[in-house]
Amino acid sequence: MPNPIVWLLLNLIDVYVWVVIVAVVASWLIAFGVVNLHNQFVRRIVQIIDALTEPVFRQVRRVVPPIGGLDLSPLIVIFGLYFIRYLIVWLDVKFAF
């Protein structure tokens, strides 16, 4: 029987990974002019995604600034999330009752 707290944490991490991916794709679409921010609905969605991801990205950028215009913070955040996910699974297996 899986631990419900572990299940919840793993699913929250998975959802946040997808939010990070959506933020990256949205920034590309905006940069290439595919998405029009004059549309109120699109602008609101982008604001929500930015509100969810930008505080975390900002903390990573303080340690690893963009290199040659390339922002590595989303990639570092995803690696960090998968590390935390692996650690949770490892601890659950190690200390399972």
Image: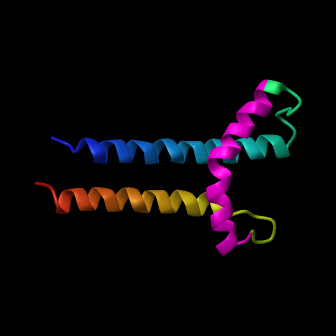
The percent position of residue 86, horizontal first and vertical second, equals: 35, 59
Instruction: Please identify the residue farthest to the left as the structure is shown.
Output: 97
Q: Is residue 46 left or right of residue 36?
A: left
Q: Quadrant of the N terminus?
A: top left
The percent position of residue 41, horizontal first and vertical second, equals: 77, 25
Q: Is residue 11 left or right of residue 93?
A: right
Q: How many marks?
A: 0
Q: Residue at x 85, y 34 (%)?
A: 37
The percent position of residue 57, horizontal first and vertical second, equals: 65, 59
Q: Main secondary structure of the magenta part?
A: helix
The percent position of residue 58, horizontal first and vertical second, equals: 68, 62
Magenta highlight on residue 12:
no
Q: Residue at x 32, y 57 (%)?
A: 88
Q: Is residue 66 left or right of residue 94?
A: right
Q: Quadrant of the C terminus?
A: bottom left
What color scheme is it? rainbow
Q: Residue at x 49, y 62 (%)?
A: 80
Looking at the rendering, the stretch of residues picked out in magenta corresponds to 41-65
Instruction: Please identify the residue farthest to the bottom as the structure is shown.
Output: 63
Query: Is residue 75 placed above or below 29 in the rendered structure?
Result: below
Quarter residue 61 falls in: bottom right
Magenta highlight on residue 45:
yes
Query: Is residue 85 placed above or below 27 in the rendered structure?
Result: below
Quarter residue 74 falls in: bottom right
